[in-house]
Image: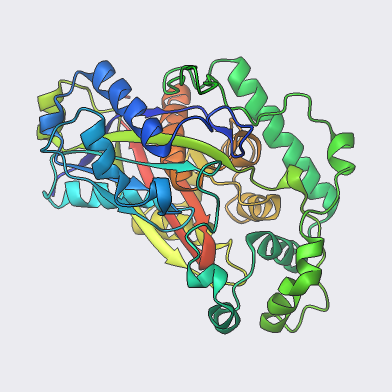
Amino acid sequence: MAEALILDYVRTPRGKGSRKGSLNGYSPIDLLTHLQSALTDRTSIEPARIDDYIVGSATQVDEQGANIARTAALLGGWGDDVPGATVNRFCASGIDAVGQTAARVRADDLSLAVAGGVESVSRVPMYADRGPLWSDPQTVARIGSVHMGIAADLNATLLGYTREQLDAYGLETQTKSANAWQNGVFDRSVVPVPATESAAGLDHDELVRPGTTAEGLAGLEPAFARLGADGQDAIALAAYPAVDEIRHLHTVGTSPAMADAAALLLIGDSRGADATGLPPRGRILATASTSVNPVVMLTAGQTAVERVIQRAGLRPKDIDVFEFAEAFAALCLKFRKDLDAGPDRMNPNGGTMAMGHAFGATGAILVGSCLEELERRGGRYGVAAVSGAAGVGVAVLIERLNA
């Protein structure tokens, strides 16, 4: 079986996922083609050698519809011969694109491929695809589908976390992210998006708030109490009758901030690596896709982590770096406790609560960030993972090379 080698990784900065965000002037295809150019420039790969191009995107409609991977390949100057496909596993779309591509490389189906993700929340809003999971009352009732914020507060209630504990994690991730940017941690991979006559451009993760304080976080109102009162709490409580009421504790400071971004990884087998002349930076050892109850929902990423570590014959203590999508503070505290993953190993440079969650792109960003942190600290094994809507989760286990 061939090895799935990571040869390079690039990403855009993460912009605010609103019309006021600095990447709102760029379409999702613009973000992808910008990274395609950066990837070919810095690696000198010949696009004709790329066997496939797999992109994750959670809302595949309008500007993110009609297989934007193939469209971006054509518009980005990669010629007629590079296929393309899009993947939707909700927030885990980008990491799933990476995992599926690695599996195909290991199966000798691909020798050189590009995998990643994109999401422009500012231009293609969440739920814009109007799928039955969001918009059909009968489907919502039968599944017990709830908003992710309600699921987060349900988890916080079930786990017994306090508002103070959640706020402390929110402050921690903001502080880490601000320090990481100040220290140039992301300089190797981030490709600035230039300003144009119609677009602001961006060279940093726009959502990071260096001045965040514990007092400021304590003053924020619960973000999902009104949503719960409008019927969402009733759906969740029907699935968990032992719970008397849901304690609404998460705020905008302890929830993932929506963002625009894209990320790409160049993945190949030994022949593909030799053809590019690039030294492999890491290898993808295993992947895992899991699912849990769609009401509690957000524990699936942790379940995937536990499964992928076990699948590789490792233990949590063998993992040097965990990059875990911060789908609300309560799930991060649970992850840290259950896997004994302290602040130095779990999201050591901050996470999506501070730097932004660009749905389809987030997982690809986490895989690349995990590899870069292993390189910085000389670690061997790392795991990236994302939880998604309806209780899905995906994890990818990587090993650093060139030790």
* Residue in the foreground of this view, choosing between 234 and 354: 234
Which residue is at a point 64% across and 50% down the rendered structure image? 332
Q: Based on the displayed image, in which of its 4 quarters is residue 356 positioned?
A: top right
Is residue 5 placed above or below 164 in the rendered structure? Answer: above
Residue 164 in sight from this viewpoint: yes
Q: Is residue 223 left or right of residue 362?
A: right
x and y percentages locating residue 339 in the rendered image: 57, 52
* Residue in the foreground of this view, choosing between 313 and 301: 301
> So how many labels did they put on this image?
0
Q: Based on the displayed image, in which of its 4 quarters is residue 183 positioned?
A: top right
Is residue 277 placed above or below 53 in the rendered structure? Answer: above
x and y percentages locating residue 305 in the rendered image: 47, 55
Q: How is the image coloured?
A: rainbow
x and y percentages locating residue 284 in the rendered image: 30, 43
x and y percentages locating residue 42 in the rendered image: 28, 17
Q: Is residue 260 left or right of residue 395?
A: right
Q: Quadrant of the C terminus?
A: top left
Q: Is residue 179 left or right of residue 48?
A: right
Residue 396 in sight from this viewpoint: no
Which residue is at a point 65% across and 21% down the rendered structure image? 179
* Residue in the foreground of this view, choosing between 117 and 338: 117
Q: Is residue 113 left or right of residue 191?
A: left
Which residue is at a point 57% across and 27% down the rendered structure image? 22
Q: Residue furthest front?
A: 197
